[in-house]
Image (cartoon, grey):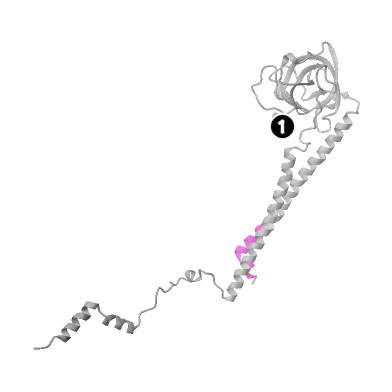
Amino acid sequence: MYRFLLTPRWWGINVFVLLAIPFCVFMGSWQLSRFEARVDDHRSAEAQADSARTQAPRPLAEMLPVDKATSGKRVTASGRYGDQLLVPDRELDGRAGFYVLTLLRTDGGRTLPVVRGWLPGKADAARAPAPPAGEVSVTGALQAPETPGDNGVSARGGLPPGQTGAISTASLVNLVSDDLYDAWVTLDTADSGMTAVPARAPSGTGLDLKAFQNLGYTGEWFVFAGFVVFMWFRLLRREIEFARDAELGITGPDASASSGSPAPTGSPASPGSAASSGSSGSPSAAQDADVDASTPVR
């Protein structure tokens, strides 16, 4: 009954199943490991942010370049404030507002973007407090450059002069001529009249949409593996039923059509019926015969 498994058709089906199931399981396990790695990064980032608040600040030069290990760490830098920009469309505690971004020309000659605080409402340069004059020393959390369209960062262009959508060297290089650090700092304590902006976790460490996409892909790959197994058993069951029906001599409803012989449309006429049909003329012919028989011969 199972000899059909040795046919070329079933060899192909079996080889496909043996390759598809391990592949689906491997891809599902890989996506699950990506999700677990993001969860671990998220926990590490939260623990790092908590410990960074109690650690003593370190010089900016010692913490560069910014990576997952240094992002969120407290740093200190000295210099003089220069140009001031606004960063619109930024939310804080569910309220819309904007950042006040001031460029700090450090003693080393390069310029560090510093977020001095957040203000509610629409971005307005007249509402932003002027930066302190003279030599200043700032302390805050080190942050990596932002990417437009990621983590709530606005990607729209056409902003008014004096505004930028993202805090990054790529965005600021078109607005200022300074030699910029590829990083920025948010102050621990905002300047008067503003609210301090909390540090953000490094990119790729939060439980964002990408993390849950990995979890969704995990389920899809395991569902694909189960579907392959289900279809294999379904095809096997159908083939066994066909083989059993053939052994019992059971044919399908269209067996006569598939045999190639046309079905009879009627029974052949017997000689007796042909004779009777030949002798039975029309009614008018029978009447003429009666008339001829009754006429006397003279």
Horizontal side, residue 197 vs residue 294: left or right: right
Q: What residue type is labelled 1?
A: Asp
Whole-percent x and y of residue 153? Answer: 72, 28
- What's the residue at 64%, 22% (across, down)? 158
- What's the residue at 35%, 82% (across, down)? 270
Whole-percent x and y of residue 203? Answer: 76, 33
Q: Quadrant of the N terminus?
A: bottom right
The local secondary structure at tag 1 comes to loop
Horizontal side, residue 126 vs residue 43: left or right: left
Q: How many marks?
A: 1
Q: What stretch is highlighted in magenta?
A: 2-16
User: Magenta stretch mostly in which secondary structure?
Assistant: helix
In reply to whether residue 239 is colored magenta, the answer given is no
User: As rendered, which of 280 and 298 lies closer to the eye?
Assistant: 298
Classify residue 150 by image quadrant: top right
Which residue has dot 1 on it? 150
Whole-percent x and y of residue 209? Answer: 72, 38
- What's the residue at 63%, 69% (across, down)? 240
User: As rendered, which of 208 and 177 lies closer to the eye?
Assistant: 208
Whole-percent x and y of residue 287? Answer: 20, 80
Classify residue 109 by image quadrant: top right
- What's the residue at 67%, 57% (across, down)? 228
- Mark 1, residues whose alpha carbon is within 10 Å: few (<14), some, or many (≥20)? few
